[in-house]
Amino acid sequence: MKQSTRLTLCAIASISALSILTSLPASPTAALGAGQSQTPEAATTQSAPAPAAAQGAAGAAPSEADANEYKNYRLNMNNVSKYVTATKGILRLMSENPTLKKQLESQRDVSTIDEAVKTTEKYPEVTGTIESAGLTTRDYVVISGTLTGSIMAVDMKKQGQIKSYPTTLLPENLGFVEKNYDKLKSMMKTLQAEADQD
């Protein structure tokens, strides 16, 4: 997959991943295993590809309000399944519409949830796809970040890179990821495979 497309797909997730990364002890990116990327953006693409905006999000930590919104969103298999359906639909749109794909790839200056929502809603096809899956655009943005951050933290703990979870993550979401780890990783792997076909 082209680097520009990879940046587009990881953008929303990058925003929230910062709240997790900044709360981990020492330098979590330095603790990544051999062969793994040393950048937050690339780390998030391995968990949950997402459309729209923000390489620039990696430059500053999210606001307290955004961090709290990500933390307090409750994940369950129903809303995660809707997220996966919406993401597949958006990837399909990008594949079928090179102009839309190029427009989405150009949106890299998003740093807040509000900005991510506004940027995504510039494209009615994308918003329609999200709504068809049963989510609002805001839900989609927040699920993307919450799911990515939770899976990334569970991955790091499983690999011994952290001993305890950051307080920026909801224990119930971490428990959900731990309980459904294999299924969730399979779902995310499927999304990544579809993104890589581009």
Image: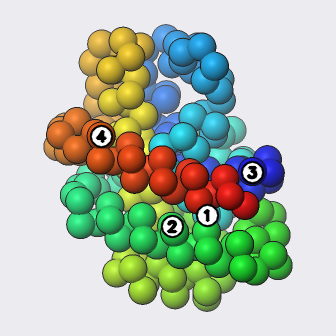
Which secondary structure lies at badge 1? loop
Question: On the image, numbered disc 1 is attached to which residue?
Answer: 51
Q: Residues within 10 Å of mark 2 (few under 14, many from 20)?
A: many
Q: For the C terminus, give its image quadrant.
A: bottom right
Which secondary structure lies at badge 3? loop
- Residue drawn at point x = 79 percent, y = 47 percent: 3
Q: Amino acid at mark 2?
A: Thr
Considering only order in the chain, which callout, 4 or 1, is on the residue closer to the N terminus?
1
* Alpha carbon separation for disc pair 2 and 4: 19 Å
Question: On the image, numbered disc 3 is attached to which residue?
Answer: 1
Q: Residues within 10 Å of mark 3 (few under 14, many from 20)?
A: few
Question: On the image, numbered disc 2 is attached to which residue?
Answer: 87
Considering only order in the chain, which callout, 1 or 3, is on the residue closer to the N terminus?
3
* Alpha carbon separation for disc pair 3 and 2: 16 Å
* Alpha carbon separation for disc pair 1 and 2: 8 Å
**Residue 84 image point, x, y percent:** 42, 64
Q: Amino acid at mark 3?
A: Met
- Residue drawn at point x = 61 percent, y = 63 percent: 51
**Residue 137 image point, x, y percent:** 47, 75
**Residue 63 image point, x, y percent:** 49, 47
- Does any portion of residue 115 appear in the rendered image? no
